[in-house]
Image (cartoon, rainbow, N blue to C red):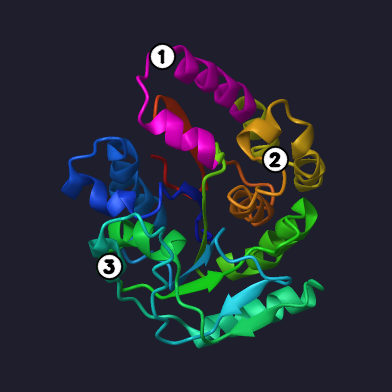
């Protein structure tokens, strides 16, 4: 039996995947195209094999313990910086939650010893609704938002993925929404508006590519025990503190959850040009390649 897909996506910069075309900003174009075409294909949306629900791990929710949104109709949390245009605070996306599947996640996490928490109040943050405006504008598939954990412990997040793995057998897909390739906000802002041929961009392009090569080897290791061992040591990869500064690795954690959810399946990647470098998305999707 084919299992539901696991995908670690790059969610882009704040609201930009949605508003960039309106503002005449071309920096997100390749990423936008992937969110609109590649991800729906991997999820098999619009086909009889579409998932009955999608669990989305957000990097913007960092409680002490893994927390699950159980609301049937979650609101949106417009968690943007104040300098964005007013229209971003009026963004809308309508899709159902699923208290029933949230309970399945809660039970799976509990059985794994993760001490999960249920939440019925927090809205979907921009790591959920911004990409999903593009991925599934019809909003016809329930979404269950799941937090990461504040301590950013690799083993805990891998265990979260392992617990979610059993839901894949019942056609529940898993998406890690993050920015695993590179999330150093100060440098990212500088590069976004820099000449792609500048020395600074070329320096960071090579640094990111070197980091990505080593991270990818770990994430795509087929043996789950060896994969976990390698990911527990991700901080030993050269340039890790440049890519994800100390105490700021939250945008990598959804990828680690995904890496825990795939057993010994073969993973694949695709890359999108972004700010003069490339960002990588990972996926495990039975019978589908993009």
In this view, the residue in front, 260 or 120, is 120
CB atoms of marks 2 and 3 within 8 Å: no
How far apart are the alpha carbons under marks 1 and 2? 38 Å
| Magenta region, residue range | 185-212
Element at label 2? loop
Taking the spot 47% from the left edge, 48% from the top edge, the residue there is 9
Residue 118 versus residue 216: which sits nearer the camera?
A: 118
| Coordinates of residue 2 in the picture (x, y in percent) | 51, 58
**In 3D space, how far apart are the residues under numbered discs 2 and 3 (Cα atoms)?**
40 Å
Q: Which residue is mark 1?
A: 198
Cβ–Cβ below 8 Å for labels 1 and 2? no
Q: Residue at x 19, y 46 (%)?
A: 23
The quadrant in which residue 84 appears is bottom left
User: In the rendered image, which quarter is residue 181 located in?
Assistant: top right
Disc 1 is placed on an element classified as loop
Asked if 205 appears above or below 269 in the picture, the reply is above
In the displayed structure image, the side of residue 162 where residue 173 appears, left or right: left
Asked if residue 273 is positioned above or below residue 63 in the image, the reply reads above
Which of the marked residues, 3 or 1, is nearer the chain's N terminus?
Answer: 3
Along the horizontal axis of the image, is 281 left or right of 290? right
First of labels 2, 3 by sequence position: 3
Q: Nearer the viewer, mark 1 or mark 2?
A: 1
Secondary structure that dominates the magenta span: helix
Q: Label 2 belongs to which residue?
A: 222
Q: Please check the rendered image and state whether residue 203 is part of the magenta-colored stretch, yes or no.
A: yes
């Amino acid at each position: 039996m084919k299992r539901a897909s696991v995908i670690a996506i790059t969610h882009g910069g704040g609201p930009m995947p949605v508003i960039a075309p309106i503002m005449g900003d071309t920096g997100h174009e390749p990423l936008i195209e992937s969110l609109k075409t590649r991800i729906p294909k991997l999820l098999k949306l619009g086909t009889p094999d579409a998932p009955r629900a999608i669990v989305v791990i957000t990097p913007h929710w960092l409680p002490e313990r893994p927390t699950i949104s159980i609301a049937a109709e979650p609101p949106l949390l417009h968690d943007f910086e104040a300098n964005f245009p007013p229209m971003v605070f009026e963004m809308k996306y309508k899709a159902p939650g699923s208290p029933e599947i949230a309970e399945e996640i809660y039970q799976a996490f509990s059985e794994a010893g993760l001490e999960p928490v249920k939440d019925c109040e927090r809205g979907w943050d921009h790591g959920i609704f911004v990409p999903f405006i593009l991925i599934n504008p019809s909003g016809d598939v329930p979404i269950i938002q799941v937090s990461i954990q504040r301590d950013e412990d690799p083993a805990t997040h891998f265990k979260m993925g392992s617990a979610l793995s059993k839901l894949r057998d019942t056609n529940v897909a898993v998406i890690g929404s993050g920015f695993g390739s590179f999330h150093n906000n100060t440098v990212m802002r500088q590069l976004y508006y820099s000449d792609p041929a500048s020395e600074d961009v070329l320096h960071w392009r090579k640094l990111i590519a070197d980091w990505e090569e080593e991270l990818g080897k770990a994430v795509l290791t087929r043996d789950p025990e060896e994969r976990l061992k390698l990911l527990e040591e991700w901080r030993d990869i050269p340039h890790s503190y440049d890519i994800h500064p100390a105490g700021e690795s939250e945008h990598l954690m959804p990828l680690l959850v995904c890496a825990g959810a795939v057993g010994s399946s073969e993973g694949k990647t695709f890359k999108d040009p972004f700010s003069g470098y490339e960002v990588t998305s990972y996926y495990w999707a039975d019978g589908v390649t993009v």
